[in-house]
Amino acid sequence: MFGIFQLLIAIFAIYSALKFPEDLRLFIPLGCLIGMLILSRIERRKSDKKTARKIFLQSEIAKVSRKESTAIKDQDFSTIESLVWPKSELLLIDTVHSIFKDLGFKISTGMNYQSVDRILRIPETQIIFGVQILMSEGEVEGNHPKISRALEFEKEKKEKEKSLIIACTHSSLPLSERSKLKNLSKEVSAFFTRHHISVITTHHLYDLWQKAKGGEIDIFDFFEKIYSHTDVPSSLTGAKNSQSPLFDIPA
């Protein structure tokens, strides 16, 4: 885009030098030259910020996945950023949707339910999740609007359907800092426990996505365990003092 503007300015500068009156032939091309220099500096700054952001994402995701930063594909960066540092809840919902679709789940909008963001199905099974996708600057508190929607779905859902929360908590912090903080307030944890609602943080979902793509885990088996409330192996959740993202299934 900047290159096109610079080209247009250069063409206008040449045209003005040939066609404009003599007293304007100097000043207009000079103004055009200054404009081109300003655009060049803006473009360079934008490129530098993009490179710095990429390096930051590489280091942060490498901490979580325990992989070399060079192993992360360039095309994954926008997905990673939208999942772990989303700019809006709508963007987060779209990203979670695309990840589950990529993993082979059947995922759709709520359709019959206005209280959930997505309906998630494990293929060739009767396992269905009503998914709420939320973001929070800190831990999830009881006044978050998605909590009341989760309760509404609990009242509407059919017998074999289960609530699942995908939560981006502490959304502006580096992952290294998030691992030291609680994702849910005591009030919300108690609420989820009472209603048998399971919770996955978005940075852990990213880790699950990468492990499933690498053949390290059976992702459908993993979510079947979530559905049936069985314990998730510690090798997948990570110890509390590790850098692995937390996985939260209320007992």
Image (cartoon, rainbow, N blue to C red):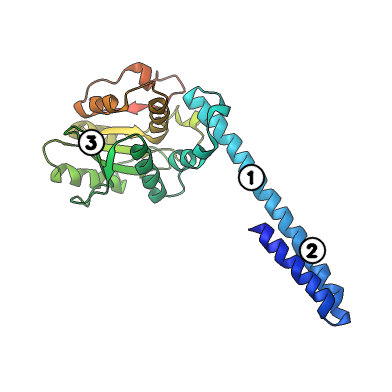
1 or 3: mark nearer the eye: 1
Counting from the top left corner in percent of width and height, residue 9 is at 73, 67
In-image side of 207 versus 123 (left or right): right
Q: Is residue 110 above or below residue 25?
A: above
Task: Check disc 2 and report the residue beneath it.
Answer: 34
Earlier sequence position, callout 1 versus callout 2: 2
Residue at 40% x, 38% y is 169
Residue at 17% x, 42% y is 154
Counting from the top left corner in percent of width and height, residue 249 is at 27, 27
Q: Nearer the viewer, residue 154 or 109?
A: 109
Residue at 66% x, 47% y is 47
Task: Check disc 1 and report the residue beneath it.
Answer: 49
Task: Check disc 3 and report the residue beneath it.
Answer: 191
**Distance Cα–Cα, label 1 vs label 2:** 23 Å
**Distance Cα–Cα, label 3 vs label 2:** 61 Å
Q: Residues within 10 Å of mark 1 (few under 14, many from 20)?
A: few
Name the amino acid, label 2: Ile
Image-quadrant location for residue 103: top left
Q: Residues within 10 Å of mark 2 (few under 14, many from 20)?
A: few
Earlier sequence position, callout 3 versus callout 2: 2
Earlier sequence position, callout 1 versus callout 3: 1
User: Is residue 201 among the parts visible in the rendering?
Assistant: yes
Image-quadrant location for residue 215: top left
Kind of element beneath mark 3: helix
In-image side of 244 versus 152 (left or right): right
In-image side of 87 versus 121 (left or right): right
Name the amino acid, label 1: Lys
Name the amino acid, label 3: Phe
Q: Is residue 26 above or below residue 223?
A: below
Counting from the top left corner in percent of width and height, residue 129 is at 22, 38
Q: Nearer the viewer, residue 243 or 104?
A: 104
